[in-house]
Image: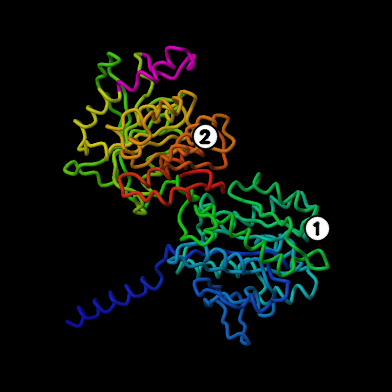
Amino acid sequence: MKSIIKFFAFTFLFLIVQKGYSQDADFHVYLSLGQSNMEGYAKIEPQDKEGVDDRFQVLQAVNCPELKRTKGTWYTAIPPLCRCNTGLTPVDYFGRNMIANLPKNVKVGVINVAVGGCKIELFDKDKSADYIATAPDWMKGVIKEYDGNPYQRLVELAKIAQKKGVIKGILLHQGESNTGDTLWTKKVKIVYDNLMKDLNLDPKKVPLLSGETVNEDQNGKCGSMNKIIATLPKTIENSYVISSKGCTAEPDFLHFNAAGYRELGRRYAGKMLSLLGYKFSEGRAPFIVQAPLGFDQINTTIPAGKIESITYESKTVGTTRKVTVYTPPGFNKKKKYPVLYLLHGIGGDEKEWLNGGSPQIILDNLYAEGKIEPMIVVMPNGRAMKDDSATGNIMAPDKVQAFSVFEKDLLNDLIPFIEKKYPTLKDREHRAIAGLSMGGGQSLNFGLGNLDKFAWVGAFSAAPNTKKPEELLPNPEAAKKKLKLLWISCGDNDWLIENSKRTHDYLSKNNVPHIYYIEPGIHDFKVWKNGLYMFSQFLFKPVDQSVFSAYTILDNPKQTNP
């Protein structure tokens, strides 16, 4: 009996400990490091201590008895955020702006380990001892507050933070003491790579944000270093440079003043928000406006859908044709599913999305987050001809014509086959069509031309095969009643953007609700994957048309959607 009691007591305590150390996915942690501008130079003003949301927290880096703060403990992030007597830092307003523009359930924690005047070598764990040995006495005094090893203190605190939250990014402001050092980017990479390894982080999911020194437009004494900082993304793929242009400085022209720190911190936040899929909410409730970093990366800890390649008989073409089908995680033949028909471009086939767009990974991740409805995704070959391979002259007249012929193949052969083979919901409200480039044009042509078959239509960078708007929707009033969602997206530097714009202009003129989503980009899978990520989250759910205008990355909502 005693052994049983001991067993249950042990189990209970174990669960408590596990719960105490369980990571909260909504607690976002950021590591910050660098020299005096990250440490905090400007005088802290009353406004900087007022109204700090308790969702914004700092993990104390050193003991500060006078502040009643203990190293390794979380506190509301009222400055100073670095050490006991440091000043205002970009991290202050990074955190404030993050909290103001993220959902209310998200908390932000920061860890700030910085040393004024130091070179980046101080944070290279293999070279820091040699660097410290030659450092001036005043700097050694600061370093001593970190027990002689700032890098190790950062890692130590980061591991404490990982027991509660998830490290989402690294903020760097350093370079003044390395001005002119052409090897600086490689030295930064050593520090970044060490942090990834020592904290078991994935560099594809943890970006490095590096701020410029005081800009030359503010007579910055180290402004020339910004040319070197600008090359950092060439050395570290997942790194981003935060502009300091216009950020005001102290009279020494080395440090930002309080106003400069506030603006620079806001810019750090703006970039990080975009990497998380958000943008400044401007008073609206925060919501995702683009795919976040890592949305297309495999997560081995979540259930995965299934990809299969099958064939169907096409009476239209007079041959057997291939099609790729994705079924969602937990697929159950006893349950009926809606279907998305996802079309490729002029140079692709039934494997193009799979090879270039990773739709199964994008959708698996969305399912795991509870953001999309379970659906079957059908990826056919949209070139309806006997030799439907994407070889030879893909622009040959017969091959181009085959993309039009596919409408008949889709409606008469493929859809009936899918609905016979798989447990599907067969009404128009549970059938969607979308595609990229040539497939985007097909989706507009076939979807809007057959609103008795499709209630959801999406086009990502629609190609010139798109019919003229008057042909696509000769009866806008009828379309308004039938469409659940019409999505048109394109990169702002896509040479084919006119196809999307003319369709949007016609829809706006006729007050047809739609989402016109223009993002920075060209004619490539970066844009198309984001299109799939965003479009798929609307499908087969109630739709609020009043929010359509908010769905754009580039800020021109008043001229986008009715």
Q: Tag 1 or tag 2, which sits nearer the N-term?
A: 1
Horizontal placement of 192 versus 35: left or right?
A: left
- Image quarter where the N terminus lies is bottom left
Q: Residue at x 39, y 39 (%)?
A: 486
Say which residue label 1 marks: 222
Identify which residue, 513 or 367, lies in the foreground.
Answer: 513
What residue lies at 50% left-to-right and 58% top-to-bottom?
200
**Which quadrant holds residue 360?**
top left
Q: Position of residue 323 (x, y in %)?
A: 32, 27
Rounded to the nearest angstrom, the CA distance separating label 2 from label 1 is 44 Å
The x, y position of residue 23, in whole percent, is 42, 66
The correct choice, above or below, for 142 with respect to 459 in the image is: below
Residue in front for this viewpoint, 100 or 240: 100
Badge 1 density bin: few <14, some 14–19, many ≥20, Cα 10 Å: many
Q: Is residue 90 magenta?
A: no
Magenta region: 387-409
Q: Secondary structure at mark 2?
A: helix
Tell me which amino acid carries mark 1: Cys
How packed mark 2 is, by other alpha carbons closer than 10 Å (few <14, some 14-19, many 20 or more), is: some
Measuring from the top left, give residue 217's x and y in whole percent: 80, 55
Q: Amino acid at mark 2?
A: Lys
- Residue at 58 percent across and 30 percent down: it is 495
Counting from the top left corner in percent of width and height, residue 488 is at: 45, 37
Is 388 colored magenta in this rendering? yes
| 133 on left or right of 304 | right
Q: Residue at x 65, y 64 (%)?
A: 33
Verify CB contact (< 8 Å) between mark 2 and mark 1. Answer: no
Q: Which mark identifies residue 501?
A: 2
Of residues 396 and 312, the one nearer the viewer is 396
